[in-house]
Amino acid sequence: MHSFFVTGTDTGAGKTFASSSVLHALRGRGLRAVGMKPVASGCERTVDGWRNEDALALLAASDPRPAYADLNPYALPAPLAPEIAAREAGVVLALPPIVDAFQRLRAQADVVVVEGVGGWAAPLSASLDQVDLVRALRLPVVLVVGMRLGCLNHARLTARAIRADGAELIGWIASEVDPEMARRDENFELLKARIDAPCWGRLMHAASADPAVGAGRLVLPG
């Protein structure tokens, strides 16, 4: 198991819970596993600086616990698309600080789970897409599919876009974000038949969900 990038079919697909569950599963194998959220918009000011809820969840699921500034190099205050949030904060997003932070994380862990922003095609800046980050870090991709009406279309389009961009899709996770979704099992089976990558598991996503419990619902390769 090597480091990889986690993307989603859309904002709210459950990337953070899936990434945290994967971190617990990797730690259960005796691996040193740390999370990374290179760019996070929607942060709160604390005595330690700007902090993002998703990044803190990844930090809590990591062992060893890295420096927050390495786990989340760009913490943008406004809960907006990164390009807009960065402009509002007077920040120019660039790859070198992210790559440097990733290398520091990689030096202290066996696996780094890098969580993206929103869906695959969500831009980071006017000149920077998430695929540019994936290329710079040389990472394969895991797709989190938010299980809700429309997920078949979103999942197939995202998987197609990942491969069209030249990235490697190594797996996907079903994230059951809508407990009222009709025919969940049937939709899941349709996705399994249409996504040309192994399914790593199904996760029930809820505000009170425990990623340590979620880890038990995952079957990771290797």
Image (cartoon, helix red, strand yellow):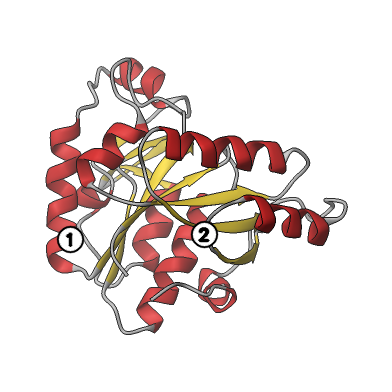
x and y, in percent, of residue 90 in the image: 25, 17
Residue ID at (74%, 45%): 148
Residue ID at (36%, 34%): 130
The three-letter code of the residue at mark 2 reads Ala
**Residue 85 appears in the picture as rendered:** yes
The three-letter code of the residue at mark 1 reads Arg
The quarter of the image holding the N terminus is: bottom left
x and y, in percent, of residue 154 in the image: 64, 37
Residue ID at (20%, 39%): 136
What's the mark number on residue 14? none
Pick the front one: 132 or 45: 132
Image-based side of 130 in relation to 173, left or right:
left
Neighbours of disc 1 within 10 Å: few (<14), some (14-19), many (20+): some
Residue ID at (62%, 40%): 156
Mark 1 element type: helix
| Count of marks overlaid on the render | 2
What's the mark number on residue 18? 2
Mark 2 element type: helix
Q: Earlier in the sequence, mark 2 or mark 1?
A: 2
Q: Which residue is mark 1?
A: 106
User: Looking at the rendering, which quadrant does residue 84 occupy?
Assistant: top left
Pick the front one: 35 or 155: 155
Cα distance between the residues tagged 2 and 1: 20 Å
Image-based side of 114 in relation to 12, left or right:
left
Image-based side of 171 in relation to 106, left or right:
right
**Residue 42 appears in the picture as rendered:** no
| Residue 143 higher or lower than 93, as above or below | below
Image-based side of 24 in relation to 132, left or right:
right
Neighbours of disc 2 within 10 Å: few (<14), some (14-19), many (20+): many
